Image: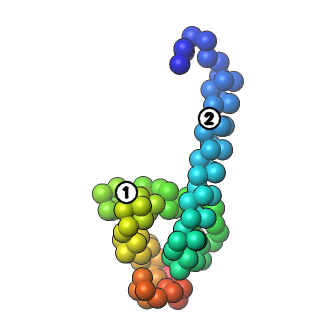
């Protein structure tokens, strides 16, 4: 990018585009979670309050598990670690094989 020709308006427009693209990806992530792991999606949405926040959570890198995001863990096929991460933040009763919707805080 030629920095001498850039303006703050150009930068603001680029940032707005990136933010919009990120929100679309986050929305896609929660859609896929609901399709592929419906029990996990339900537990997550119930804990954070809505789909948008749930989508952001699964896309945010966590300190545990090597700094991977829950989305990366799921991409690696490691659903159990995502359940464990949920359990460490909110008390979620049950096991990955059960609905795990008995939630307490």
Asked if the residue at tag 2 contacts the one at tag 1, i.e. Cβ–Cβ closer than 8 Å, the answer is no
Residue that sits furthest to the top in the current view = 4
The image shows residue 101 at horizontal and vertical percentages of 54, 85
Q: Give the answer, above or below, for where 3 lies relative to 95.
A: above
Examine the rendering and report whether any part of residue 69 can be seen. yes
Q: For this rendering, which residue is in front, 101 or 88?
A: 101
On screen, residue 74 versus residue 25, left or right, reads: left
Residue lying at 42% horizontally and 75% vertically, measured from the top left: 83
**Residue at (43, 86) in percent of width and height:** 97
- Left or right placement of residue 53 versus residue 99 in this view: right
Which residue sits at x=53%, y=80%?
39
Residue 2: assigned label: none
Residue 53 visible at all: no
SS label for mark 1: loop
Q: Quadrant of residue 28?
A: bottom right
Return the x and y of residue 21 as percentages of the image width and height.
62, 44
Q: Is residue 86 above or below residue 17?
A: below
- Classify mark 1: residues with Cα within 10 Å, few (<14), some (14-19) or many (20+): some
- Determine whether the residue tagged by mark 2 lies in a helix, strand or loop: helix
Dividing the picture into quadrants, the one containing residue 68 is bottom left
**Colour logic:** rainbow
Circle 1 residue: 68
Q: On the image, numbered disc 2 is attached to which residue?
A: 15
Q: Position of residue 34 (x, y in %)?
A: 58, 71
Residue 12 in the image, given as x and y percentages of width and height: 66, 30
Vertical side of 93 occupied by 37: above or below: above
- Work out whether mark 1 precedes mark 2 in sequence or the reverse, and give the earlier one: 2
Q: CA distance from mark 1 to mark 2?
A: 24 Å
Q: Residue furthest left?
A: 66
Residue neighbourhood size for the residue with mark 2, other residues' Cα within 10 Å, grouped as few (<14), some (14–19), many (≥20):
few
């Amino acid at each position: 990018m030629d920095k001498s020709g850039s303006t703050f308006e150009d930068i603001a427009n680029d940032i707005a585009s990136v933010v919009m693209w990120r929100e679309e990806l986050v929305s896609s992530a929660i859609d896929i979670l609901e399709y592929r792991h419906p029990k996990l999606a339900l537990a997550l949405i119930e804990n954070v309050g809505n789909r948008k926040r749930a989508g952001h959570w699964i896309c945010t890198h966590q300190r545990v598990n090597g700094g991977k995001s829950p989305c990366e863990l799921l991409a690696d096929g490691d659903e159990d670690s995502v359940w464990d991460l949920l359990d460490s933040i909110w008390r979620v009763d049950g096991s990955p094989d059960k609905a795990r919707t008995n939630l307490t805080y």
